[in-house]
Image (cartoon, rainbow, N blue to C red):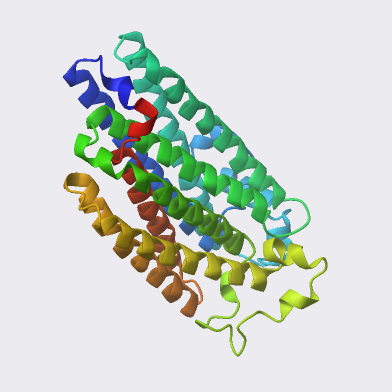
Amino acid sequence: MTAAVSSPQKDSSRAIATWLFICAASVFLMALIGAVTRLTESGLSIVEWAPIKGALPPLNAADWQREFDLYKQTPQYLKVNRGMSLSEFKEIYFWEWLHRLWGRMIGLVYAVPLAFFWLRGRIPAEAKPALLGILALGFAQGLMGWLMVKSGLVDQPAVSHYRLAAHLMLAFLIYACMLRMALAFSCRPDPDAGRATVLRGGIKIVLGLAVLTMIWGAFVAGLRAGLLYNTFPMMDAHWLPPELWAHKPLWKAFIEEPATVQFTHRVLAVLTVLSGLWFYKRARGFNVQGRAGTLFKALPWVLLAQAGLGIATLLHAVPVALGAIHQGGALVVLSVLVWLLFEIPDIRSRS
């Protein structure tokens, strides 16, 4: 992907990089809005998918009453929020409407400049497939978001935790791709960092564990497992949740039983931090300088900070602010790891 920016003029590369950084920042903010939407249980307040007309909120009393009447037919209202007032409904409606509106805005902020740069011939041929792929992921994300909401409008007053995880990880993938492309258009890896190519395997291990931790974090969110066992490091008086042994089949407990899912998230988080600390210790022997060196030094701190946020979020039974910040912290960890992979060139693939 780095070669994709070798031919455009410097000004074009800078403009494209700025556009992609803005898009990535917008997705980052979208993830925070999505976290608040989920934590306030607002995601099921809008029961229709109207990509165009849905951009406008209800504009009069009749429109609000219609939206409220539709919501009253949902399992969430019937089983959880029965008796909710219209003013209370407006509060949860706002977050879901903002979440969807911001998604539409990201689509425009990405697609319109993409078309402009494309038609002006400012995008190198090597970068076009990747940029079109990000656009396709955006469409898939919108569809997955609706499929997620739809799963909570049938029988249970909650969305499928599998679909929630797919929705969240698609957002993280889009963010990572945008960030990687923005870096490719804005800077080149330090050639001296190529001597640390052997470290790429370690970066990928930490990244793989981090992604698994994020997936199980989404499972925790979807199953509301963060409201169970609000102690650390033990789960009340247990190292292993008692619910694990009662679940049949046993292996499914790790992806479906709430307490065991929380336990798995904890274990993966600890493994991610330990692998990051091990990797940092190994990387110090290469004495990498420049941006890569700074990122190596930052990695253990962002991992420890994210773990601390996770523990605090758990101990306080997932307050909205801490939960949203914790989700943002996952993106910070992802950013450092994606940037590190960019900064450490794979010189073996070029030989």
Q: Nearer the viewer, residue 279 or 226?
A: 279
Q: Position of residue 92 (x, y in %)?
A: 53, 57
Instruction: Please state if 262 lies on the left or on the right of 338 as rendered.
Output: right
Instruction: Please state if 159 lies on the left or on the right of 350 as rendered.
Output: right
Q: Nearer the viewer, residue 345 or 121?
A: 345
Q: How many marks on residues?
A: 0
User: On the rendered image, what quadrant is the N terminus found in?
Assistant: top left
Q: Position of residue 3 (x, y in %)?
A: 31, 22
| Residue 249 seen in render | yes
Q: Residue at x 46, y 58 (%)?
A: 36
Q: Nearer the viewer, residue 334 or 103?
A: 334
Q: Residue furthest front?
A: 351
Instruction: Please state if 344 lies on the left or on the right of 164 as rendered.
Output: left
Q: Residue at x 44, y 69 (%)?
A: 310
User: On the rendered image, what quadrant is the C terminus found in?
Assistant: top left
| Residue 86 seen in render | no
Q: Residue at x 60, y 46 (%)?
A: 166
Q: Nearer the viewer, residue 301 or 173?
A: 301
Q: Residue furthest right?
A: 248
Relative height, residue 314 to residue 123 (above, below): below
Q: Position of residue 272 (x, y in %)?
A: 46, 62
Relative height, residue 9 to residue 30 (above, below): above
Q: Position of residue 145 (x, y in %)?
A: 59, 42
Relative height, residue 154 to residue 194 (above, below): below
Relative height, residue 77 to residue 240 (above, below): above
Q: Residue furthest bottom?
A: 237
